[in-house]
Image: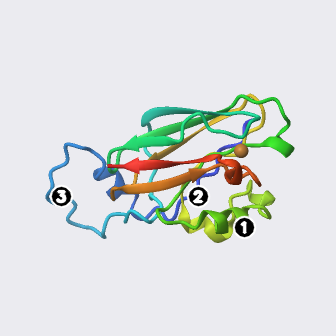
Amino acid sequence: MKTTSRIFFGTAAIAALALAGCGRSQPAADTASTAAPAAEANSPAAAKPATGRAIAITANDTMKFNITEIHAKPGEALAVTLTNEGTVPKFSMGHNWVLLAEGTDLNAFASEAATAAATEYVPVSFKDRVLASTKLLGPKESATALFYAPTKPGRYPFLCAFPGHMQVGMKGELIVE
Ligand SMILES: [Cu+2]
């Protein structure tokens, strides 16, 4: 399938700032004189990096991610690639990878997600809480989410939004430290 991954980012207004602020060697001083505040940790990153540290995650018909913890530096560019290694058709066993803002109510998200088939189970009502996501994958498909880790240290939940999957453990955390 050629469908482009839908990444539910917010406005692009602060894209340039996010790009400017991602390097670890960046001086502490604020170098962007024109600027609005950089993206807060709980706001979706405004820009996607062109590339990032590759992190491979697999999912399969047992409804588990092979990785449940990802560690990252604040603002680090990441390229999370989810591969669905299962064989069960997408309509009954699709998987995606959705990173959410710190403190998001996962049960509330899952409850909304269950009726959000039209948006690949990523509910529009939680759009502002989605920091990065892949499209929904059928068997043997893979997709990559390119994003900057939040700049604020913390634990950011990720999950598969397909109905029922988070509840049986298809979730983990991005730990920014
Ligand atoms: Cu799943």
Residue position for label 1? 112
Question: In which quadrant of the rendered view does residue 49 lie?
Answer: top left
Q: Position of residue 160 (x, y in %)?
A: 66, 49
Q: Earlier in the sequence, mark 3 or mark 2?
A: 2
User: Residue 31: which disc?
Assistant: 3
Q: Quadrant of the N terminus?
A: top right
Q: Position of residue 74 (x, y in %)?
A: 32, 50
Q: Compared with residue 140, is residue 96 higher up or lower down, i.e. above or below? A: below
- The nearer-to-camera label among 3 and 2 is 2
Q: Compared with residue 142, is residue 43 higher up or lower down, i.e. above or below? A: below
Is the residue marked by circle 2 packed among few (<14), some (14-19), or many (20+) residues within 10 Å?
many
Q: Position of residue 125 (x, y in %)?
A: 66, 71
Q: Is residue 127 left or right of residue 87?
A: left
Q: Is residue 123 left or right of residue 88?
A: left
Which secondary structure, mark 3? loop
> Which residue is pictured at 33% across the width and 59% down the height?
152
Residue position for label 2? 8
Closer to the camera, 29 or 65? 65
Q: Residue furthest front?
A: 168
